[in-house]
Structure formats: C-alpha cells, structure tokens
Image (cartoon, rainbow, N blue to C red):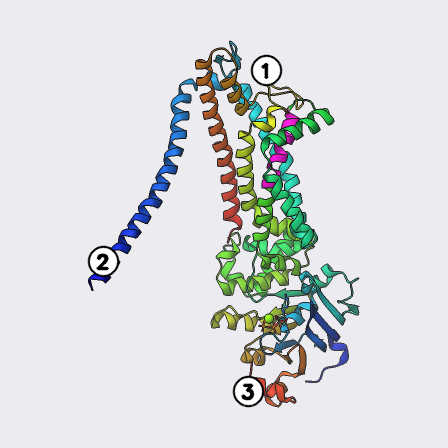
Amino acid sequence: MKIRISNKFSSAVKEKIGFTFLALCIVITLLFLAGIIYLIFSNGLEVISWEFLTSVPRKGMTAGGVAPAIVGTLYLTVGAVAFALPLGLACAIYLNEYGPRGFIVNIIRMSINNLAGVPSVVFGLFGLAVFVKFFGFGVSILSGSLTLGILILPGIISASQEALMAAPYSIREASLALGATQWQTIKKTVLPAAMPGIMTGVILSVARAAGETAPILFTAATFYKRGYPDSIFSEVMALPYHIYALMTEGTKPDKQTAIAYGCALLLLAITLLISAVAIYLRNKYRSLYAR
Amino acid sequence: MPVKNNDVRIKAENVDFYYGTHKAIKNISIDFYNDKVTAFIGPSGCGKSTFIRLLNRMNDLIANAKACGSIYLDGENILSPKADVVKIRRKIGMVFQKPNPFPKSIWQNISYGLEIQGEKDKKKIEAVVEDSLRKAALWNEVKDRLRDNALKLSGGQQQRLCIARCLAVDPEVILFDEPCASLDPISTNKIEDLILELKKNYTIAIVTHNMQQAARVSDFTAFMYLGELIEFGVTSQIFTVPKEKKTEEYLSGKFG
Ligand SMILES: Nc1ncnc2c1ncn2[C@@H]1O[C@H](COP(=O)(O)OP(=O)(O)OP(=O)(O)O)[C@@H](O)[C@H]1O
Ligand SMILES: [Mg+2]
C-alpha cells in the first residue's frame, strides 16, 4: 500500500518537473524574443522621427534620415516577389497538376528543396556573376530583385505545392464533371481554394527577402546614394545593408550605432506591416473559400 | 414495360476496366433507356462506381487505369481516345456520394457551369440559377441567401445544390453515385422524389446500397457481382422473380 502511494507521488512529482521544464523552455524562448525587441526599441526608438523616415542621410551618415534605404528595401522586396511569385506558382502548378508523376517529380522536388538550403551569400555570388556581369544589369534594383527572387523561389514553390495538394480532390471532380477543362478547374476551383496557403508562403518569403543582406551585397546595395533611385538600373540603399555598413564603416561609431538600431526597428516594422497585409488578404480568402 | 431499341440512350458493349492489373469490370454490356432510371446494386467493391464513372470518363483521372470495349452515346464512342471529354461531361452530369459543393456562394455554385462555357449574359445566368434551384426543390429554402457560402447549407441541401449545379449545364444523362449515402431519411426522401421528377426529362443511372430505394425510384435494375453484370432487367421483375440464383441470394440478404 505504502509503495503504491509513494509511486503515485513520485510520478506526480515527475510530471510536475516535466511541466516545469517545458514551461521553462518557453520562458527562455520568450526572454530571447523580448530581449531582441527591448534592445531594438530601447536603442532605436530615440532616433525615429519624421525626419528620420522622410529625409536623406547627411553628414556622412551621422545625421538626417534613411528614407532612401526604406524605399530601396521596398523596391527590392516588391521586385523579388513580383519575379518569384508568378514563376514559383507556375512551377508548382505544373509539378502538381500537369507534370509527370513519380520519379522525375520527386527528383525535381528534391532539387528545389536543396535550393532552399543554399547559403544566401552563394545566391549573392550567383547574382553577381549572372545578373550583374553576364546580363549586364550592373549593381541595380533589377539584379538585386532577381537575386532575392531566386532566393525565395524554393519557399514559394513548396508552399504553393502544399497548398495545391491540400485543395480537396472532391471539388476538382465536381468541376471536371461539369465539363470544365483541367485549366479551368485549376484557375477557378483549385487556385482559389489554395490561395490562403499560397499567401502564407508569400508572407514568409517577403519577410525573408526584406531582411536578407548577403544576396544584395554585391548585386544591388550601396552604402550611400545621393537621393532616390530613378530606374530599375539604379543601385540602391537598403535597410539590412545599411545596418551592416553603419556598424562596420565610418568615423563616428556611437552616432552610427544609434542609427543602425533605428534601421533595425524600421526593418522589423516593415516586415510586420507587409505580413499584416498578407495575413489580411489570406483571411479574406479563407473566409471566402475555407471549409 | 416494353422498350423499343430506338429508346436506347447509352449503349455499353463488352466493357472491361483495369486498375493497373486488377480487372474491376468484366465484359459488361448494358443499355440505358431514355427517360428511365437504371439502378445499380451489388455488394461493396463489385465495381458499381467504377462502371458508372466510365460513362462520363471520370476514371481518366486515375493513373495506370485502362478501359476496353465501347460505350455509345448519340452514336459516338465515349471510351474512344479521340472522344471530346468536355463535351461528354456536359451531356452526362454526375452527382457524387458526398455532397461536394464548391467553397463559393450558392449562386456561384450554379453559375459555375455556365461561366466555364463562356456565358456572359447576366439575365440568362440569373434565369438558369433560379430554374435549376427550382428543379432541385431548393429554391424556396435559399432564394433569400444566394450570396451565402454553400458550405453553410445542411448536408441534404448541399446535395440538392449539387443536383441543381448539375442541371444548370443542361445535361441529357445524370449519374448518381450513392447520392443519399451521407444523408438523413428526410433528405433522402426529398432526393428520391426529385429523381422521380427528373426522370421525366433525363436519363438516369443511380448506384445505391438501399434496396427500397432501388425499388422505389428505378425502372430497371442491374445487379453486379465481382465486376460482372449478373442480371439486368425491369426492376419489378428483378425484385420479385430474379432469374439468377446470385441475384436472389443477394436480395434475400445471404451476402453483401
Ligand atoms: N482508384 C482505384 N485504384 C485501384 N483499385 C480501385 C480503385 N477504385 C476502386 N478500386 C477497386 O475496384 C473494385 C471496384 O470498386 P468500386 O469502387 O467500383 O466498387 P463499388 O461497387 O462502387 O463499391 P461500393 O459499394 O463500396 O462503393 C474494388 O475491388 C476496388 O478495390
Ligand atoms: Mg461506390
């Protein structure tokens, strides 16, 4: 009798220890997250002002604003998605709906997944060799967007593929049985049903494209540019690279560090903003189409 | 019930069907008559769904499947590789076992078939939507909520919506694969009444596990067993004096 009670007791204690341990893990994770946010806000908030957001840098980056870098990051991100979304979606549709079944598709899928694991600086080198040099686009928005586009392509393809696969078979059948062609079925039934999933893929990609430094290092970014880019062949300032430059170059480290934190804060805000828009779109589609 | 040969709408001759190496349909020949209901009965896995899905080429979606023989509709062989699948499916509509409305509005579910045919005329679409919903005995229940998502409807309403959706493209033949399998008795009754109403204008094939249902709605009954058509005849005869021993055993519940 005694033994049983003590057994019960010890298993309850074990359970308690287990729970405490798991809870602790969450607390540690949240602490890191809170730490990052605190660090960025406490150091960055002081430099944020209307001027910081809307004017060009002055006095060798130690004063003025970072507007050109904000604009540059937006251009690069939008460009990357504009390139990668149609291409990735088309690939996903082909692989999932039309492509040959089995072995070949598996090989292609594996290659795409491997592409996702390639370090981003390698994409940067590729962009330099191909877009900047070979195609002669120079260090420009175009080269940077394409490079970032290739970087996010695997993510977009696999997210789209998963979303397409998750679209119920029964509604494809329904559409085909009404005399729809396969393309009509994909366009009018499968894609709308897959849209929330595709949006999720885009959200993650946007956040990634906006924050990457290495791919634009040799293909698009410049430390300082007088004024704003005037064409897709201009080089641009971009927030992630600007942070890197402020922390590694220049003559007034303390002033520059403050601005770098300000940029980090902005980058965080922009990423959240784009995500919010994408989440809004996703929910709109979801309420229309989800079961 | 005497039937003349020129009343034949669909004529299947020596049809075989393979899933890979598994022969699921064995040399079936059968006629479907104009404006009549033909019921398919038989134990689970005997090939009823497989066979009626051959009629509108739904089995095309299955990898490694192969069909032999011929099925004639209006003098054209449905099974021929040269046959126009889209045209066939417009003539032969289908209602599935589980209601499968599109995750769109009630209206969009019905207008879908017209839109894919390129119909732009709003007035015409409006007329067809109302007409189809009336024919499917659903109009009164949904006329004030046509913009609502179809998935908000009950199971029985969803199935009638699927019937309306099928009627909207004006088929000649309608295939029902266990249309009441997931429905309650009241909804089932409604669908059965509907089928009786529809057969005035449409040739109908229905798969069912419910013998009463087969007896109630069908003019002809086909009994299948292990991929073969064991017996085909007028429903009242099949249910009272079946010619084949297997049919009798199945109907008396000896197996199935
Ligand atoms: N996609 C498929 N691939 C391989 N075999 C299949 C496939 N679909 C059905 N079969 C097989 O073909 C045979 C006939 O199946 P079918 O679905 O036509 O039977 P059924 O008479 O409709 O049965 P139920 O009454 O249970 O719906 C079964 O042996 C089944 O296992
Ligand atoms: Mg079946």
Q: Which residue is mark 3?
A: B252
Q: Are marks 3 and 2 in contact (CB under 8 Å)?
A: no
Q: Position of residue A291 (x, y in %)?
A: 50, 54
Most distant residue in the left direction? A2
Q: Are marks 2 and 1 in contact (CB under 8 Å)?
A: no
Going 64% across and 76% down the picture, which residue do you hit?
A: B37
Residue A49 appears in view:
no
Mark number, residue A6 = 2
What secondary structure is the magenta-colored segment mainly?
helix
Q: Are marks 3 and 1 in contact (CB under 8 Å)?
A: no
**Mark closer to the chain start, 2 or 1:** 2
Q: Nearer the viewer, mark 3 or mark 1?
A: 1
Looking at the rendered structure, the kind of residue marked 1 is Lys
Name the quadrant where ligand 1 sits.
bottom right
Q: Nearer the viewer, mark 3 or mark 2?
A: 2
In 3D space, how far apart are the residues under numbered discs 2 and 1 (Cα atoms)? 73 Å
Write the start and end of the magenta stretch as one range.
Answer: A141-155
Of residues A69 and A2, the one drawn nearer to the viewer in this rendering: A2
Residue A147 magenta-highlighted: yes
Most distant residue in the front direction? A3
Looking at the rendered structure, the kind of residue marked 3 is Ser
Indicate the quadrant containing the N terminus of chain A: top left, top right, bottom left or bottom right: bottom left
**Label 3's element?**
loop
Q: Chain of mark 2?
A: A
Residue B89 appears in view:
yes
Q: Nearer the viewer, mark 2 or mark 1?
A: 2
